[in-house]
Amino acid sequence: IIRLTAEGFCVAERVYEKHVYIRDFLLKAGVDKNTAEIEACDIEHVISDDSFEKIKKYIRMLNSHKWDTILFMAIFLFHVEKCLDIDI
């Protein structure tokens, strides 16, 4: 039986969070399940908390609907520019 201190439990929880997030990201990117498990296991121990949080923030931004709005506006402005023969 292994018993963790409160601090050790927090560290283990953080490493596991990294593992699950990285594994799921790799799976969504098309990596096969076995490779995703192995590589997430490698990455979880070397990525800093700061880098991990920044990656999570970046992915959340990519998954947000902000990009839908930005893409819509870009397409809309492109068509307005072409239809009205103006420079925006």
Image: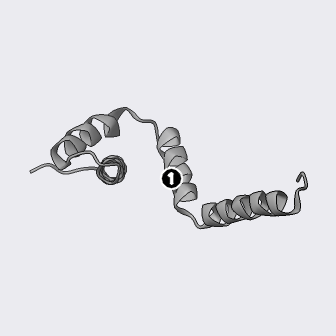
Q: Amino acid at mark 1?
A: Ile
Q: Is residue 67 left or right of residue 1?
A: right
Q: Which residue is mark 1?
A: 59
Tell which of 1 and 56 is nearer to you.
56
Residue 7 in view: no
Which residue sits furthest left? Answer: 1
At 76% across and 57% down in the image, what residue appears? 78
Q: Position of residue 77 (x, y in %)?
A: 79, 61
The mark total stands at: 1
Residue 46, picture quadrant: top left
At 47% across and 44% down in the image, what residue appears? 52
Colour scheme in the image? one colour
Mark 1, residues whose alpha carbon is within 10 Å: few (<14), some, or many (≥20)?
Answer: few
Q: Position of residue 50 (x, y in %)?
A: 53, 41
Q: Position of residue 23 (x, y in %)?
A: 29, 49
Residue 64, picture quadrant: bottom right
Residue 23 in view: yes
Q: Secondary structure at mark 1?
A: helix
Q: Is residue 82 left or right of residue 38?
A: right
At 55% across and 45% down in the image, what residue appears? 54
At 49% across and 51% down in the image, what residue appears? 56
Tell which of 34 and 11 is nearer to you.
34
Please determine whether, in this image, residue 54 is positioned above or below residue 67. Answer: above
Q: Position of residue 24 (x, y in %)?
A: 32, 54
